[in-house]
Image: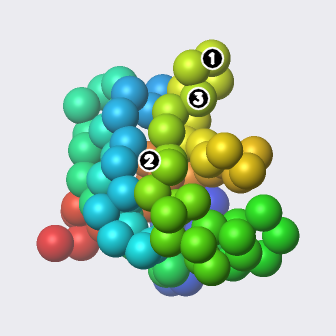
Amino acid sequence: MLIHHDGLTFELQHHDVVAVRAIGPTRLHVAFDDGLAGELDLDAFTPWTGVFQALRDDPALFAQVTVHPELKVVCWPNNADMDSAVLHARLAAALQAR
């Protein structure tokens, strides 16, 4: 499925997250099962409301990011999680734009 957002076109396909680590207060390094890996600044596309507000307000909580063992998505202890298809598409687009 193709989506259009912020002047970019993304193809959404599911890819498992195989590794993730926080590298700043709103930045992650994410690796996917197809070999795609790199840095994402969540400020660019994350509404810091609801469960995400706590991640923005508490860098120690944000740093506790992990891969959900069953769903293979980025998640945090406060039950916040991110769609791996969206993260994959955003990262692929960012790497192509360089």
The quadrant the C terminus occupies is bottom left
The disc labelled 3 sits on which kind of residue? Answer: His
Q: Residue 50: give its label.
A: none
**Residue 66 horizontal/vertical position (percent):** 49, 39
Residue at the image position 64 percent from the left and 24 percent from the top: 71
What is the C-alpha distance between the residues marked 1 and 2?
A: 18 Å
Query: How many residues crowd around disc 2 within 10 Å: few (fewer than 14), some, or many (20 or more)?
Result: many
Q: Say left or right for 95 vs 49.
A: left
Query: How many residues crowd around disc 1 within 10 Å: few (fewer than 14), some, or many (20 or more)?
Result: few
Residue at the image position 25 percent from the left and 53 percent from the top: 38
Q: Say left or right for 96 vs 2.
A: left
The residue furthest top is 70
What is the C-alpha distance between the residues marked 1 and 3?
A: 6 Å
Q: Which circle's residue, 2 or 3, is located before the other in the chain? A: 3
Q: Hey, which quadrant is residue 94 in on the image? A: bottom left
The answer to whether residue 87 shows anywhere in this view is yes
Residue at the image position 56 percent from the left and 52 percent from the top: 86
Residue under label 2: 88
**Residue 53 horizontal/vertical position (percent):** 72, 75
The quadrant the N terminus occupies is top right
> For this rendering, which residue is in front, 56 or 3?
56
Q: Say left or right for 69 vs 78.
A: left
**Residue 97 horizontal/vertical position (percent):** 24, 72
Contact flag, marks 1 and 3 (Cβ < 8 Å)? yes
Please identify, in this view, whether the residue under mark 2 or under mark 3 is nearer the observer: 3
- Secondary structure, mark 2, is helix
What is the C-alpha distance between the residues marked 2 and 3?
A: 16 Å
> For this rendering, which residue is in front, 10 or 53?
53
Residue under label 1: 70
Please identify, in this view, whether the residue under mark 1 or under mark 2 is nearer the observer: 1
Residue under label 3: 68
The disc labelled 2 sits on which kind of residue? Answer: His
